[in-house]
Image: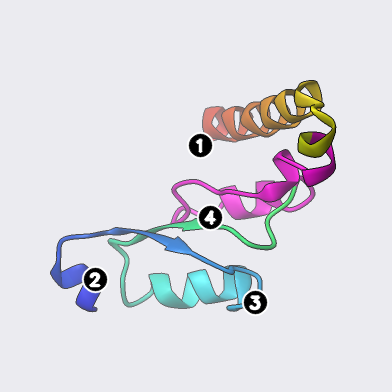
Amino acid sequence: MAILATGIDLIKFFPASVYGGLKAIKALSAPFPQVRFIPTGGINADNMTEWLSNPAIAAIGGSWMVPAKAIDAGDFDTVRDLCAAAAATAAELDKKA
């Protein structure tokens, strides 16, 4: 409520899976329908569609797109490909909305 008093209505929700996941977002959205969330922590390629399908979710973040092993190896093609795949999935969902 203190955040809303400042006029902020877009909030990062981290670590999302630890703090109740989508159930928590749904619970928070009921009394605060004007708030949109950007969850991170526990989001991955397998569950991103479920997260992005919730109207209270403005965007998501996830380290699965930037694996430490790829960074350490200088394998930025993998990072690019994972980010492009996530963006394509999000764009498809946006078209359906």
**Left or right placement of residue 15 versus residue 25 in this view:** right
Q: Nearer the viewer, mark 1 or mark 2?
A: 2
The answer for how far apart the CA atoms under marks 3 and 2 are is 21 Å
Q: Is residue 29 magenta?
A: no
In the rendered image, the vertical position of residue 76 relative to residue 55, given as above or below: above
Q: Which residue is identified by label 2? A: 3
Disc on the earlier residue, 4 or 3: 3
Q: Which residue is identified by label 4? A: 54
Q: Secondary structure at mark 1?
A: loop
The answer for how far apart the CA atoms under marks 2 and 4 are is 22 Å
Disc on the earlier residue, 3 or 1: 3
Question: Which amino acid is tagged 2?
Answer: Ile
Question: Which amino acid is tagged 3?
Answer: Val
The answer for how far apart the CA atoms under marks 1 and 4 are is 11 Å
Q: Quadrant of residue 1?
A: bottom left
Q: Nearer the viewer, mark 2 or mark 4?
A: 2
Q: Which residue is identified by label 1? A: 97
The span picked out in magenta is 45-70
Question: Which amino acid is tagged 4?
Answer: Asn
Disc on the earlier residue, 1 or 4: 4
Do residues under tags 1 and 2 come within 8 Å of each other at their CB atoms?
no
In the image, residue 28 lies at what x, y percent? Answer: 42, 75
Disc on the earlier residue, 3 or 2: 2
**Left or right placement of residue 73 versus residue 42 in this view:** right
Residue at the (78%, 45%) spot, across then down: 68
Q: Which residue is identified by label 3? A: 18
